[in-house]
Amino acid sequence: QRLTGAGADDAERVQEAALRPKGLAEFVGQPQVRDQLSLVLDAAKVRGKAPDHVLLSGPPGLGKTTLAMIIAADMGSQIRVTSGPAVQHAGDLAAILSSLEEGEVLFIDEIHRVARAAEEMLYVAMEDFRVDVIVGKGPGATAIPLDLPPFTLVGATTRSGLLPAPLRDRFGFTGHLDFYSIEDLQTVLTRSARMLGIEATPGGLGEIAGRSRGTPRIANRLLRRVRDWAQVRGRGIVDLEAAKAALLVYEVDERGLDRLDRSVLSALCRRFGGGPVGLNTLAVSVGEEPDTVGEVAEPFLVREGLLSRTPRGRIATVEGWRHLGLTPPDTIPT
Ligand code: ADP
């Protein structure tokens, strides 16, 4: 199992649901987004209207879904959850849109993956609250315009740059989520430990926070794995010893790099002499999808200053070489 890949599978989603903050006040960190969003929501309440459409961008596991649920809860509305890959035909989207109720929040995760054929329909729905339902097939087909009740679309994307401009422009508010500080992650972990009834020391939680690559989802996941270790091989307490021992077993290093991160960095240094090399080539050489390398491993390695993006490709930094215990070359390409 990949421990630090930031995406979640279904089983994890179930566990996560229990830990999701239910309101903005409980949502740790991201002060700017929180503040801006609370303004959007309060203004909507004052006007008695559904809030403007909201776009949330940022790497996986930083709280986009959580915020969408908070928006709905705050407005006292229902939330409908779907994702870009699930909207492959205009008909998929028409079915969802035409069943929305007044004030409902429609959350589309990975909105940059919505099929082209459905994009146009999304624009009209967002702007004019209307959907054209196609009745019949072939030359006899007719479009029947259907008015939609006011609703709020919350879109999530890993990079807002992936969205076509006309779609991006139709959101009234865009919030960008950034990686969390270690202090914020410690707060997330303290809350999670309390909710899960896990006995933990600040030292143990601090160690986990420092290796969670700025991502609450990963922090919570590592907490569960350290708890396993503590219960089976330790004293039942998530302390520094348990954290260090468990993360050694799971191959998460002191800086939070996991196997994939290290194999990307290692391929870059050992196989490509430190680069520059293209993302696709790099991904193929470690046997991973370019998306996984580009959206999960790379942003973290860049943030840690171990890898840089240059116009000619990816390069390992001096620190990148050193992290692997290798001697950097005399000149680093630019
Ligand atoms: P995304 O949709 O961006 O992939 P999620 O909203 O699903 O991320 O968050 C993943 C997990 O991390 C959730 O279970 C949630 O409990 C936790 N989490 C995310 N952001 C926060 C936060 N700011 N405070 C506390 N927990 C958080």
Image: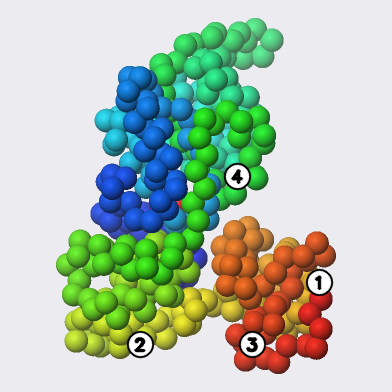
- How packed mark 1 is, by other alpha carbons closer than 10 Å (few <14, some 14-19, many 20 or more), is some
Q: Are marks 2 and 4 in contact (CB under 8 Å)?
A: no
Judged from the image, the secondary structure of the residue bearing numbered disc 4 is helix
Relative image position of residue 268 (x, y in whole percent): 71, 77
State the residue at coordinates (81%, 76%): 333
- The answer to whether the residue labelled 4 contacts the one labelled 3, judged by CB atoms less than 8 Å apart, is no
Q: Which residue is mark 3?
A: 322
In this orientation, which residue lies closer to the viewer: 2 or 170?
Answer: 170
Q: Element under label 1? A: loop
C-alpha distance separating marks 2 and 1: 39 Å
Please give left or right for residue 50 compared with residue 173 in the image: left
Residue underneath mark 4: 160
The kind of residue tagged 3 is Arg
Residue drawn at (39%, 43%) of the image? 35
Q: Is residue 41 left or right of residue 280?
A: left
Kind of residue sitting beneath label 2:
Ala
- Quarter of the image that includes the C terminus: bottom right
Which badge, 2 or 4, comes first in the chain's sequence? Answer: 4
Instruction: Tell me the tag on residue 60.
Output: none
* Residue that label 2 marks: 245
How is the protein colored in the picture? rainbow
CA gap, disc 1 to disc 3? 18 Å
- First-in-chain label (4 vs 3): 4
Viewer-nearest residue: 286 or 170: 170
Q: Is residue 256 visible?
A: yes
